[in-house]
Amino acid sequence: MWREARYLTGLIRTLLRVRSIEPASTNLLVDDVEAAVDRWADRLAIRFEGAELTYRQFDSLADRFCAWAGARGLERGQSVAILLPNRLEYLPLWLGLAKRGVVAALINYQLTGEALRHCLELSQARLCFVDASTRAAFAAAAPEGMAAVEIDTELAGLDPSARRPPATARAGMTARDTALLIFTSGTTGLPKAAPINHVRAQLYMRGFAGATNAKPTDRVYVTLPLYHATGGLCAAGAALLNGAAILLRRGFSASHFWADIAAEKASMFVYVGEMCRYLIAQPSSPAERAGSVRLAFGNGLSEDIWPQMRQRFGIERILEFYGSTEGNVSLFNFDGGEGACGRIPFYLAPLFNVAVVRFDAETDRPVRNRRGRCVRARAGEVGECLGQVHDQARSAYSGYVDAAASEQKLLRNAFRSGDAWFQTGDLMRRDRHGYFYFVDRVGDTFRWKGENVSASEVERVLAQVPGVSAAAVYGVKVPHHDGRAGMAAIVAAPGLDLDLLAQALDRALPPYAQPLFLREVDGLELTGTFKTRKQALAAAGFDPAACGGRLWLHDRALGYVRLSPHTFGRIQSGEERL
């Protein structure tokens, strides 16, 4: 009863905040923020590196950016790229552009070269905001005709007399209009641009204002990048639509995290899962329990780390959620079931557009029966999570700027003729109480020796081996063998004992799940939200030449032994079976 009461309280509170969102509505995201400004004008809105903005000052700065856009001749529907790290002016900048109907393309400021140029081209912007840290990367990658706008120079020249534009200035706009472009992390290739209309932005911001139940007295600590929806919309909405304050940092620092939390008197923080793993890996210190954090909210917190976060750091409550920038599936774990990314009790299932279907790891496609229909997974069975596409705000699918890429994510005629479901690309299992547990990404689960292997499960085991600083697991094709063999790229600390590593894997994993190949790397390439980019690792395969020779093969009798070019050749020719 306690669990159901807590779940229903959170769900009802969230649904009440989003119930009036409609695609045809003329109430836009900027109207939501302006209403919050008018209510909490003189409260602290955002604090960054000693500088502060009240709600009134926050809105005034946005109005000046709106006037700047007008002076530059920018019209409704045109876009401006923002290539900036976290800073005090970031949120007021894109809000000011939105007040004029100009689309802000939020680009990962860590990108360079081809990936950066690709995002800039997708944005279709003719102007891009930069600062001293991004100027050179922009200059090297900028498409022809796109000009840099120096944020610090423009700040000095903003019109101080600018006032809030009347709502009539947005006449003709509806919540269907695009407010932002947010880019996927690009873990499996170049990033994709997802158009975020006012409906989706309102769902993020209002939804988390309700889900977190933040109060005006709360102080929300944000170290995640503002170019990403979790930090820039979810956390921002939780604070700004409730009169709370954002304590913004330039980036995440595991060693300074808890001291900063205590010094800033933060009562909430937003996380992604790997961030929490870094915190657990830090040596204990008095600072980690010196604050008064009542809520941590975010996504990707694994089942093994969850209890450690609560017990070690004394966090009152963890609110895990699930969603994606471009998708239409939203889940919340309101009642705190450990390890679950969300919950749908059986008696509320008709209210949600979510299904988990059986999945074939060999073909990377959902299983279809003899009638050509998908098959719902049973409780406890792993399958792909899907979201049915409807016209309603909570289940609409806007996809990507690239229409072909959008269509590729849709599964049609899944359960009946004419239906359409968004494929999340995430494998989950659902238990009999309705809790959903993330298992792996599609493609990260591979099949070897007739069995499915979860890369994330193997990574969790490796992370617990002394001397393994980081690990990425993936499947590689082996000639003359079915499926894909497991391979792990590890960042090793000095003195790593491979015999102990092999023993640890043998104790924790069945033989088919133990990595057949082991590669030592100097570091793993991460996205801005701490996801590992595995594409280049998988492309190199287990070729000693491509891997720089730092490669081992798992021998059942001897443990991990060096993989020589000679042995590699025998595997390639089929002379040596694995």
Image: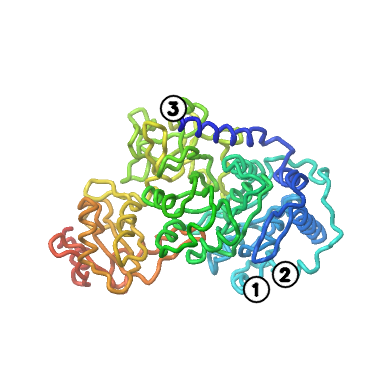
How far across and how far down the image is residue 350, in percent? 49, 26
Q: Residue at x 62, y 53 (%)?
A: 219
Split into 4 quadrants, where in the image is the N terminus?
top left
The residue indicated by pointer 2 is 152
Total numbered labels placed on residues in the image: 3
User: Residue 522's quadrant in the figure?
Assistant: bottom left
In depth, the one of 344 and 249 nearer the eye is 249
The residue furthest right is 161
Estimate how packed mark 1 is, as few (under 14), some (14 to 19) or many (20 or more) residues with alpha carbons within 10 Å.
few
The residue indicated by pointer 1 is 132
Quick check: marks 2 and 1 in contact, CB under 8 Å? Answer: yes
User: Residue 227's quadrant in the figure?
Assistant: bottom right
Q: Earlier in the sequence, mark 1 or mark 3?
A: 1
How far across and how far down the image is residue 137, in percent? 59, 71
The residue indicated by pointer 3 is 346
- Disc sitting over residue 231 in the figure: none
Task: Check the image and tell me how it is coloured.
Answer: rainbow
Three-letter residue code for mark 3? Phe
Q: Earlier in the sequence, mark 2 or mark 3?
A: 2
Three-letter residue code for mark 1? Ala
SS for callout 3: helix
Report the Cα–Cα distance between label 1 and label 3: 53 Å
Report the Cα–Cα distance between label 2 and label 1: 9 Å
Quick check: marks 1 and 3 in contact, CB under 8 Å? Answer: no
Estimate how packed mark 3 is, as few (under 14), some (14 to 19) or many (20 or more) residues with alpha carbons within 10 Å.
few
Q: Is residue 366 above or below residue 231?
A: above
